Image: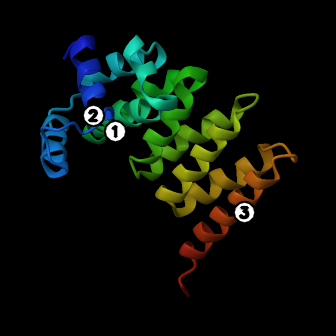
């Protein structure tokens, strides 16, 4: 699929429902075209994420745009997680892609994905939003990998980010309790 075709699909998914489709019809159409997802799209999708077209500015705070784009990336990643992670890994170090990629990788729900996310903690300073996405990723994946990443994140978060530190502690407590066989 070309850049232009993907942009059109993202805009359709991110835009308002419109008068011609019911919500059910919209979801059926979205599921139909998401089922066509391909690992071949990943490079183009990353390029769109890092260099959004003018149409992306039409969506409030780009939230709907990035969400729709992220959903496509998740679907692509689910096709072959190791290949997907290798392909997106270089972009974790680019601030234009990092926040979206963190939640995309978390939404793969795979413990090995957290190994890739843990590596971004070596970046000098993540934004509060990137840290929030990393906490979310750990929450959805869970398990020993999540505990390890949350512990490491707790050490790397600046002390003045008290709200984030509370979120990390809460997520760590939940992750650790899920490992305890007595629960």
Residue 159 left/right relative to 73: right
* Residue at (45% x, 19% y) in the render: 57
Assign the N terminus to one quadrant of the image: top left
Which of the 4 image quadrants contains residue 65?
top left
Horizontal and vertical percent position of residue 37: 20, 32
15 sits left or right of 149 in the view:
left
Residue 163 screen position, x and y as percent: 76, 54
Q: Residue at x 58, y 67 (%)?
A: 175
Identify the residue position indicated by label 1 in the image. Answer: 71
Q: Label 1 near label 2: C-beta < 8 Å?
A: yes
120 and 163: which is toward the camera: 163
- How crowded pointer 3 is (Cα within 10 Å; few <14, some 14-19, many 20+) is rated as some
Question: Which of the two labelled residues, at mark 2 and mark 1, occupies the earlier sequence position?
Answer: 2
Say which of 152 and 107 sits in front: 107
Q: Kindly state the secondary structure of the residue where label 3 is placed.
A: helix
The residue that disc 2 covers is 13
Tell me whether circle 3 and circle 2 mark residues in contact (CB < 8 Å). Answer: no
Pick whichever of labels 3 and 1 is earlier in the sequence.
1
Q: Position of residue 127 (x, y in %)?
A: 69, 34
| Residue at the farthest bottom position | 182
- Quadrant of residue 48 within the rendered picture: top left
Relative side of 7 to 99, left or right: left
Label 3: which residue?
Answer: 169
């Amino acid at each position: 699929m070309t850049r232009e075709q993907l942009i059109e699909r993202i805009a359709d998914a991110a835009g308002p429902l419109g008068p011609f489709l019911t919500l059910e019809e919209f979801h059926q159409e979205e599921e139909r075209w998401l089922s066509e997802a391909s690992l071949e799209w990943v490079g183009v999708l990353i390029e769109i994420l890092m260099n959004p077209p003018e149409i992306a500015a039409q969506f409030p705070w780009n939230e709907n745009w990035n969400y729709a784009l992220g959903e496509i990336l998740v679907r692509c990643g689910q096709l072959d997680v190791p290949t997907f992670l290798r392909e997106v890994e270089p972009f974790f170090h680019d601030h234009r892609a990092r926040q979206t990629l963190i939640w995309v990788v978390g939404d793969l729900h795979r413990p090995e994905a957290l190994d890739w996310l843990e590596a971004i903690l070596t970046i000098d300073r993540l934004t509060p939003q990137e840290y929030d996405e990393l906490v979310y990723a750990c929450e959805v994946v869970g398990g020993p990998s999540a505990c390890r990443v949350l512990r490491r994140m707790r050490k790397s978060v600046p002390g003045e980010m008290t709200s984030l530190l509370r979120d990390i502690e809460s997520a760590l407590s939940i992750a650790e309790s899920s490992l305890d066989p007595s629960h």
